[in-house]
Image (spheres, rainbow, N blue to C red):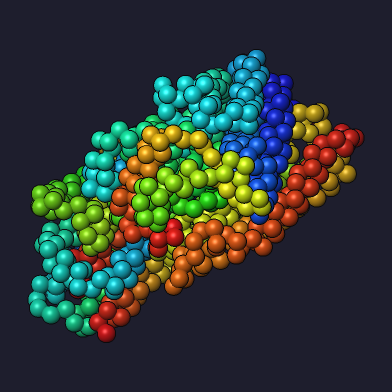
Amino acid sequence: MSAHFLNVIWVALMVATVLTWFIGKSGQMDTGAVVAILVIAALKGWMIIYDFMALRRVRLLWRGAVLGWLLATLALILLAYWLGLK
Amino acid sequence: MTGTHGASHSSGHKLHHYPPGDLAIWVFILAELFAFFVLFNAYAFTRLKHLELFNEMQLTLDANAGMINTLLLITGSWCVARAIAAIKANHCRHSAHWLLVAIGTGVGFLIVKYFEYGAKFSLGINLDTNLFYTFYIALTMFHAMHVVLGMTILAFVWKKAMAGGYSAHDHHGMETGASYWHMVDLVWIILFPLIYVMR
Amino acid sequence: MQYKSQAVAMPYFIAAIALFVAQILFGLIMGLQYVMGDFLFPTIPFNVARMVHTNALIVWLLMGFMGAAYYLIPEEAETELFSPKLAIALFWIFLVAAGLTVVGYLMVPYATLAKMTGNDLLPTMGREFLEQPLITKLGIVVVALAFLFNISMTVLKGRKTSIATVLLIGLWGLAIFFLFSFYNPHNVVRDKFYWWWVVHLWVEGVWELILGAILAFVLIKVTGVDREVIEKWLYVIVTLTLISGILGTGHHYYWIGTPESWQLIGSIFSALEPIPFFGMTLFAFNMVNRRRREHPNKAATLWALGTGVMAFLGAGVWGFLHTLSPVNYYTHGTQITAAHGHMAFYGAYVMAVLTIISYAMPIIRGRAANSNKAQVVEMWAFWLMTISITFITLFLTGAGILQVWLQRVSDSPMPFMVAQDQIALFYWMREWAGVFFLIGLITYIWSFFIPGEEKAKA
Amino acid sequence: MSEAFTTSTARNIFYGGTMFFLLVFLALTYQTEQVIPKRDKREMLADPMVVAGKKLWETNNCIGCHTLLGEGAYFAPELGNVVKRLGSKEAVMAFIQSRPTEGIPGRRSMPNFNFNEQQLKEIAAFLHYVSEIDTAKWPPNIQG
């Protein structure tokens, strides 16, 4: 992993964090906002897992375990919020 | 200590058999992730039954502090990733410096948490104030203790790095510590929007 | 046997089995009292029988742990025991103290016993499982400390293996947490809170370290798998045990006046408690499948595998059934708890002690393994006892579900005693399963008296 | 398992993880001690009758048959709420006193402990104290 690439990932993560915060600050929390926040969280988690944890080039068993954790957690949270919005 | 993940980066497309660091830490990481998985879901589904309480109480939280802490942890994670990149290029001193900055972000995180909790505790809020605060304090405090543990591990790694204990050929131990630290970051990436932002 | 001081384990094992018999006999008395309320009344009231039943269990498991430690520590440390004489002396002190305590329970009304033994100086008696008179408790502390001294000195002068380390941490933890049995505040909530520091942190904490160490030791011996591999497994299992088990204490803090945040913490971490037990099952089977030799002692291997499975079922699965606070709200303090307790103690601790006895006794008696015939009988005993305890657990679970339904969930809840009459059939079936358990135990003891002609390499 | 998994790391995680969770547990214990004064009715312990009652409870091994707040033996009824179930302390005292010495043929029966009037009052005071503890609405109903 080149240092430059890590820097790009870092900046992307910082921007995404501010974006999440901004969505939270600005007005109504509707379905769109919840989905957006969760998608951002998924992307951030994906970057951390692939590039910081360096699981990108590890065989699927391990990569899948952690990615699966990320997606399963977010999916269940989405379900819970979706049930709450109804 | 073996350096199985060290020199093989140039080889390109071949997948590694094991994740970076000691497999023992990965068993621990998976166990911890599972615990947080249960905690997050417990929060999300308990919230369903107490929507008004959770929505109301969430507004009392300091989302700015939450955001700053997210930035700090991400930066810390980035520093550790840079430390690994540096050691792979055999830049021992650089690597150690990156680790120190990472520990610094952990300190920053705890300082922000100190003020955040201080504001809450001075209002007499504690673990048993109401169901939302039970979750808020249990989850964030449990996570904060992971930050402390992660910092402790990084401190050991830093000490060894300063003593020249790692090299491009052998940095298995550093990768072990790094993996744990990234896990602490990863958990917060979900914790922040869940507790502070999403209503 | 590599070190002759290992032989001090033998009296401990024999006494353990003798107390095991006493435990089961009193269990049968209690089981009968559940359906024939006046049985032996007022000579041996239920509470007295129960004290003997539970305290005999605790003491014989402790005897088993001590015997296990005396057997495996010299072999691990590769040196003779620090003081075999001390070990024998402690055995007699412990046995006499335990015997006198049981005689006291049976012969004297409990209140009188309390008065005679100085309970007024420091009231510690009359709390579940910690009913022992003050002097017995002090005796336990003295014996435990002297035992730990003996064992620790042995390890210090010899090789320090991971198995010995984990066993020592477990044993020291056992002694340290027992000290909380001397703390008995007037405040019932605080009394109960710290009472669990003995009970929970024993059986769902440090005892599991002892269990893991015993299992790891026997598995190394019977499978010939590399120590390196087994010790890694051991560390992973005991780590998972303590990271789930320590906070898992919270599942006892739901309804006793403690803060309600424990409902969250206790539910989450005790929900993780089956994981280390599942790890233990995988561990036992994995090692046996990868075995590098065929050890002549098949019975010991069977006990080791059985421990893995039954500990997971009893402690893991049956524990999980009622550990979440919304479920526990209805099941707390019913026969469900009794069902879990029976299978968990048998599967985890009884079987672990029987595993080490099964492995060590033939060797102490001068042979690598018992004769084929003796082993066949022992395996019969294994299946009889294991299947019986499974049925005891199932019947008690049935009784518990019915009890919860009639007394807790129903729109017109029944009084306790009325509900008990409704579930008498389950109690009868439990008692019969108990009889089969006793037959299994007798079979087990019989297996020791079948001559062992096979002389093989140790 | 492979060489990627070292015993020394596994051991360090064991020590570190255990210390970590022990510290969390101690922190929660501290929190518990802070909160329970509001729940445990400790002011009632100022009454020496309650304290004496607890000792009687213990030295007669009541827990050997009964549960108290769900803990104990499951042979006889829950007593954490018995004062509320029977309606009064006096009713509890009368029940304890009325137990036949020789039991009831074919049925479970509580032994007669030959308590004097003072002791009966102490036991009842203790049970009354326990019934006032805030147990998060447990038991689900008055039958215990």
Give the vertical position of C431 relative to D27 (above or below). below
User: In the drawing, does residue A13 fall left or right of residue C185?
Assistant: left
User: In the drawing, does residue C369 fall left or right of residue B7?
Assistant: right
The image position of residue C326, as x and y in percent, is: 40, 64
The image position of residue C365, as x and y in percent, is: 80, 28
Residue at 59% x, 28% y is C108
Task: Please tell me which residue lies in front, D120 or A61.
Answer: D120
Residue at 40% x, 63% y is D141
User: In the drawing, does residue B152 fall left or right of residue C432?
Assistant: left
Q: Is any part of residue A49 visible from this angle? A: no
The image position of residue A7, as x and y in percent, is: 21, 62
* The quadrant where residue C100 appears: top right
Residue at 63% x, 32% y is C106
Residue at 44% x, 54% y is C270
* The quadrant where residue B166 appears: top left
Give the vertical position of D91 relative to C414 (above or below). above
Considering the image in quadrants, where does the C terminus of chain B appear? Answer: bottom left
The image position of residue C259, as x and y in percent, is: 29, 51
Considering the image in quadrants, where does the N terminus of chain B appear? Answer: top left
Task: Please tell me which residue lies in front, C114 or A10.
Answer: C114
Please give the count of numbered marks on the rendered protein. Answer: 0
Q: Is any part of residue D99 visible from this angle? A: yes
* The quadrant where residue C299 appears: top right
Give the vertical position of C286 relative to C140 (above or below). below
